[in-house]
Image (cartoon, rainbow, N blue to C red):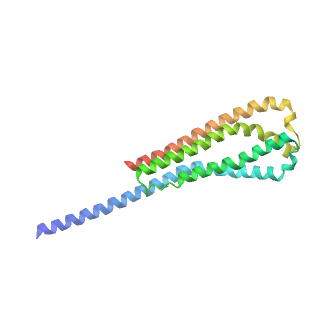
Amino acid sequence: MELEEMKGLWENMSEELDRQKLLTDKMVVEMTRQKYRDKLGQISLPETVGTIICFAMATYAIFNFEKLDTWYLALCGIISIAFCLVLPILSLKSIDRMKKIDFGKKSYRESLIQYAKEKDRFIKVQKAGYYLGFVFSLAVLPVAGKLMRGKDLLLDAKLWIWYIPLALIFHFLFSKWVWKHYSSIAQGAQNLLKELKD
């Protein structure tokens, strides 16, 4: 009888250990999921704020578009509005796609493959923003000058002599800082997914 009791106790302990391991695994996945979302939140918050600012600028430019009374100011206005509307939407969509990866329901390999795919998409959008940002830096000043001061800044050669180098240097330095920050966050999110394998 003692052997039967020991066998029964052993089976009960084994079942209890299996339940605890399953519970622990679920808790680890949930904690990792939360850390992953928090990491991506460090990217999505500034992108959301930037999107709101871009939409406000685009809205202001659209409602005052008639003040852009020459063809080159209108062209600068169209470039500025397109940049302020299209790029933020693409950026937020790519971040949202990374956030929606449900690595608790997919295999580790599938989750990592999907993350790599979505990360590549996000990087492409950021690179497009980087290169198009140079054009935006040059197009937005004449639009802002005309809409806010009523002046055609494209006719002021002295302004452009110092503005172009400063705008390009600022854009380069700011974009480099943002890229470094976003890359480290994206790598951190990828590392969290890799921790699941262990």
169 vs 182: above or below: above
* Residue for point 61% across, 37% down: 177
Task: From the viewer's perspective, tell me whether residue 33 is left or right of residue 181.
Answer: left
Horizontal and vertical percent position of residue 118: 53, 48
Task: From the viewer's perspective, tell me whether residue 34 is left or right of residue 77.
Answer: left
- Spot the residue most to the front: 71
Looking at the rendered structure, the number of numbered marks drawn on it comes to: 0
Q: Quadrant of residue 22?
A: bottom left
Q: Quadrant of residue 141?
A: top right
Task: From the viewer's perspective, tell me whether residue 102 is left or right of residue 87.
Answer: left
Horizontal and vertical percent position of residue 114: 48, 49
* Residue for point 76% across, 50% down: 58
Identify which residue, 104 or 34, lies in the foreground.
104
Residue 144 in view (yes/no):
no
Q: Quadrant of the N terminus?
A: bottom left
Residue 79 in view (yes/no):
yes
Q: Quadrant of residue 168?
A: top right
Horizontal and vertical percent position of residue 49: 67, 51
Horizontal and vertical percent position of residue 76: 79, 41
